[in-house]
Image: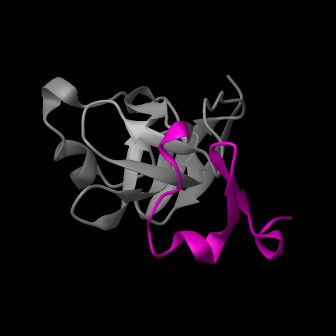
Amino acid sequence: MDNAFFFSPQAGRQVEAPRRVSARFAIGDVVRHRMFDFRGVIFDIDPVFANSEEWYESIPEHIRPRRDQPYYHLFAENEESSYVAYVSQQNLLLDGDGGPVDHPQVAEMFEDFALGRYRMRRKLTH
């Protein structure tokens, strides 16, 4: 298998990942967690798990997701607060019908919400 490496600030190391990965969701998509009551907008994607071992081990083993799948960085919200979440692909569902995400950082990265997703600010695209 032909793999590539990328540096993960969260893991503090180089992470090996396949060159071709199928991400089910895209930057700007609004998603909902399958098990927990929160939703968010995707602002970054890792092709495989790229967070710290402590973070991974803190997830109860019976619900711990596989490492070999895309992981998504979300501007997330629930009834009580806004925060940044890191979620495996297997635990996400599209939630475009739920309306915009009320997170204070969304406006820094995205322009507008239409058809269930956000459009990234032009100055941030390449």
Rendered residue at 56%/60% (across/down): 7
Per the rendered image, the range of residues in magenta is: 97-126
| Nearer-the-camera pick, 99 or 45 | 99
98 vs 85: above or below? above
Query: Where, quadrant-wise, is the C terminus in this rendering?
Result: bottom right
The magenta stretch spans residue 121: yes
Relative to residue 118, is residue 91 drawn left or right?
left
Name the quadrant containing residue 37. Answer: top left
**Picture residue at 61% right of the left edge, 54% below the top:** 6
Q: Which image quadrant: the N terminus?
A: top right
Measuring from the top left, give residue 25's x and y in whole percent: 61, 36
User: Is 107 covered by the magenta stretch?
Assistant: yes
46 relative to 33 in the view: left or right: right
Q: Position of residue 51 (x, y in %)?
A: 39, 53
User: Residue 4 falls in which quadrant of the image?
Assistant: top right
Q: Where 88 sits versus 27, above or below?
A: above
Whether 66 is drawn above or below 124: the answer is above
For the residue pair 54 and 33, the one nearer the viewer reads as 33
Residue at horizontal 26 percent and vertical 45 percent from the top: 56
Q: Is residue 25 left or right of residue 12?
A: right
Of 27 and 53, the residue lying toward us: 27
